Image (cartoon, grey):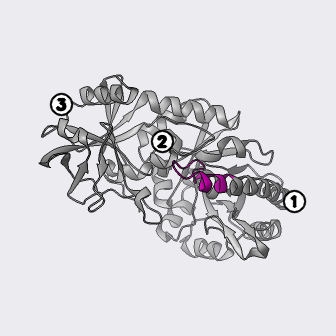
Amino acid sequence: MTARAADRARYDRATAQLDAPVAIVDLDAFDANADDLVRRAGGKPIRVASKSVRCRALLERVLAREGFAGIMSFTLAESLWLARSGFDDVLLAYPSADRVGYAELAADPKLAAAVTVMVDDPAQLDLIDAARDGGGEVVRVCLELDTSLRLLGGRVRVGARRSPLHSPAQVAEVARAVARRPGFKVVGIMAYEGHVAGVGDAVAGRPLRSRAVRLMQAAARRELAERRAAVVRAVREVVPDLEFVNGGGTGSVQHTAAEDAVTEIAAGSGLYVPRLFDNYTSFTGRPAALFALPVVRRPGVGVVTVLGGGYPASGAPGADRLPVPYLPEGLRHDPQEGAGEVQTPLLGPVADDLLIGDKVWFRHAKAGELCERFDALHLVEGDAVTATVPTYRGEGRTFL
């Protein structure tokens, strides 16, 4: 029996009394992935990206482990909810226009101490001030650095379009703008190198593309390390007591941790290891989060149909954004239909071994987005479900 076949047998036994659709997290794999992230971080603390987890119980589990500290959140409403739930170090990774949230933040000493907001434009400070509604608490601010690699005099750009702040002078100028404003304090710098951390460099069957990605990423890491260090020096001239410099992502943990200027690493997807994180030379994780759909039809030889399955991930549309059938091995999507809203046909000789009611296990393309489809995660240890915990959705929290 292969390792994957053994996993299928375990998951089927663990969920035998549960009707599909159902989602699980294999805690042995989750904890092993957490250990690997800590190893790669080389002693620097890892701030957990909540968008890649979206389950309070699992955030608590990983933050209880040595090597993890703090949360990187994705909306202001989520940040405030987490802070009220007892998480005392929440970095909002994206600028917000949530005026109600800012009024709550500025009026509550506990929230203001626990939550740090993201800024890359003085206009965002204007919005926060206009939303204060009399709240006088000091708002903690993190400045975001654009990490994109710019070539040929800026005519070629590689990387996500995030912050407009690219040079040390630009970041330092915004730091000065914050320092001049009563009611704000710069406490950190963040730089997410998505073109390194979030792009696989070992794509199966595409050796030339993989080599090109590795060359690009090597150049990007060198350029960013030099520029990030210069940015930190420039900001420290304005804010000598800067608390943290955050960088990285699951795919670049060890590279970013090697930079002296970086004090902490961000990671989250590496806990669940969705399918987009299969194609890396720098690490190999264990799939920890899966979902099962039930076989409801057998349309013909070599075909079964499962209920649901149209759970595409965000990003540029493409086949790589679809969930993939994982267990049993040997199933594939019908290219004419793909993953369907209500039903999904699956092809392959192994389909003939499946009966009505059997489970087919899938992996999602991205990590936490799976939790937007399920109210609960069943936590599996060995061949048993040892706990069932709500996702954000299960707690009635849909922040985006």
Q: Which residue is mark 2?
A: 273
Q: Left of 265 or right of it: where is 340? A: left
Residue flagged by tag 3: what amino acid is it?
Answer: Gln
Is 204 one of the magenta-colored residues?
Answer: yes
Residue 93 visible? The answer is: yes
Q: Which residue is mark 3?
A: 17
Q: Secondary structure at mark 1?
A: helix
Mark 2 vs mark 3: in front:
2
Residue at point 26%, 61% (across, down): 337
Residue flagged by tag 1: what amino acid is it?
Answer: Glu
Quarter of the image that includes the C terminus: bottom left
Whole-angstrom CA distance, mark 2 to mark 3, is 26 Å
Dots 2 and 3: beta carbons under 8 Å? no
Q: Is residue 268 above or below residue 378?
A: below
Q: Which residue is mark 1?
A: 237
Quarter of the view holding residue 190: bottom right
- Label 3 CA crowd tier, 10 Å (few <14, some 14–19, many 20+): few
Mark 2 vs mark 1: in front:
2
Q: Which stretch did the figure color magenta?
A: 198-214
The x, y position of residue 22, in whole percent, is 26, 42
Q: Left of 114 or right of it: where is 151? A: right
- Label 1 CA crowd tier, 10 Å (few <14, some 14–19, many 20+): few
Residue at point 78%, 46% (across, down): 259
